[in-house]
Amino acid sequence: MTDQAKQPEQEKQKETLAESIAGFAAVYVSGLFIITFVIQHFEIPSSSMEQTLLIGDHVFVDRLTPTGKNFPGPLMPYRNIQRGDIAVFVSPAEPGLYLVKRIVGVPGDRIHLIDRKLYVNGVEQKEPYVYYDVNSPYHAPDEYRDDFPAISPFGRATPEWAASMHKYIEGQDLVVPKNHYFAMGDNRDVSYDSRFWGFVPKENIMGSPLFIAWSLNQTADDFAPRSLPERIVAFLYTATHFIGMTRWRRTLHLVH
């Protein structure tokens, strides 16, 4: 052989510090963009949406499609919230508090309940997702809650809702106004919802849950206010019992 063996190709130059920083910044900005405008993590702290969502479910919320707030325009995915959708929104009664409920009434809908059965525009609704714990003390009859809006709201609803509800009542129905929604939890006996604090303004809607990222076997007591030492102890317990506490069958479960 007269030809000399070819020299190995030069090793690829190592990434410089500036390039490393730029790469990290790009990943960070992309992640920040996604969690700010597209999806957001939300944890379920109450039983108001059982059995659809359980206490301890961690869901990813689609902030873009149901609202169109962040990116208006014909090229971006968007559709209005529809009857039957689950929505995450800012509480009309307690600003800063996020709630998750099912939208049962959209603008123009006429709503009433008779003996827990929901009627929309005169038609009884088939709601396979609604849950009642017949062994719970909360399942006892409650005229205001179960026959809404036939019973006076005073003493049961927030003062603001009690004072204004009559403006939206026509006959036996409550009429949902423009740019507002009526929301209730799937666990109807325990849900503190539109029956008690009124309509959800469109601008309060944050998004819709997509899927359960993971689920921990927790109770409402785990979300009660605690001192800093108690929170640290609870965190350490969860961290060391994470595998046993996880409801693996609910992982990546779609929310609908």
Image (tube, rainbow, N blue to C red):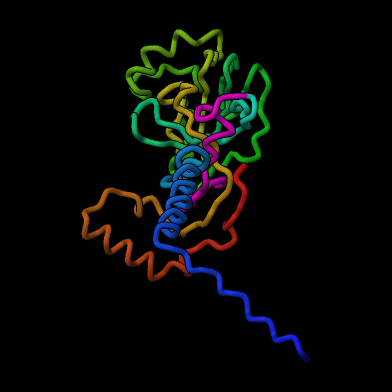
Q: For residue 176, which quarter of the picture?
A: top right
Residue in front for this viewpoint, 165 or 248: 248
Seen from this angle, which residue lies furthest front?
A: 2
Residue in front for this viewpoint, 151 or 220: 220
User: Would you place residue 152 above or below residue 184 in this image?
Assistant: above
Give the prevailing secondary structure in the magenta stretch.
Answer: loop
Query: In percent of the image, x 44 and y 22: which residue is there?
Result: 198
Residue 143 percent across, percent down from the top left:
47, 25
- Visible residue check, residue 83: no
Residue 64 percent across, percent down from the top left:
55, 34
- Whether 186 is among the magenta residues is no
Quarter in which the N terminus is drawn: bottom right
Q: For residue 197, which quarter of the picture?
A: top left
Residue 114 percent across, percent down from the top left:
57, 24
Query: In percent of the image, x 53 and y 54: which residue is there?
Result: 213
Quarter in which the C terminus is drawn: top right
Query: In percent of the image, x 63 and y 32: which residue is there?
Result: 77
Residue 94 percent across, percent down from the top left:
34, 30
* Range of residues picked out in magenta: 50-73
